[in-house]
Amino acid sequence: MKRWYQEVGKEREGIARVQIKTEVLTHYGKGYLACVICGESRLACLSIDHINGGGRYQTLCMNCQFLKSVLDRAKYKET
């Protein structure tokens, strides 16, 4: 079984992860597999973002995610 997993199972698991990630990011990307801000579409660059820390989500690339956090911290310091 261990040998089977190393040869076949690992590959199948990786394929399933990519399929699930693609479905989730497309859903939260308003039907597109892309960052809702800049349009970046490389799967490895995309992540889920909490809108205003609440229960709503959106798909952002890592760069837009980082920029959003920097701008949010700047707003917090101003208040």
Image (cartoon, rainbow, N blue to C red):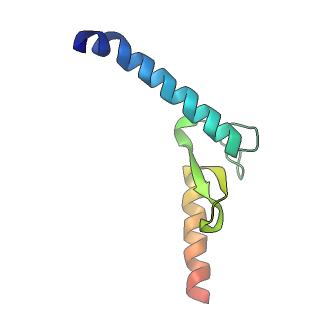
Q: Which residue is depicted at the point 67% across and 46% down?
A: 35
Q: In the image shown, does 42 or 3 lie closer to the viewer?
A: 3
Pinpoint residue 27: horizontal percent, then vertical percent.
Answer: 70, 40
Residue 18 in the image: above or below residue 9: below
Is residue 16 among what the camera can see?
A: yes
| Residue furthest to the right | 31
Residue in front for this viewpoint, 23 or 68: 23
Give the residue furthest to the bottom.
Answer: 79
The residue under the point 25% across, 11% down is 1
* Location of residue 68 by image quarter: bottom right
Q: Quadrant of the C terminus?
A: bottom right
In the rendered image, residue 60, in percent from the top left (x then y), is placed at 63, 50
Relative to 13, 72 lies left or right? right
In the image, residue 9 lies at what x, y percent? 37, 16
Where is residue 46, by image quadrant? Answer: top right
User: Residue at the location (64% across, 68% down)?
Assistant: 52
Residue 16, how many percent across, how many down?
Answer: 50, 24
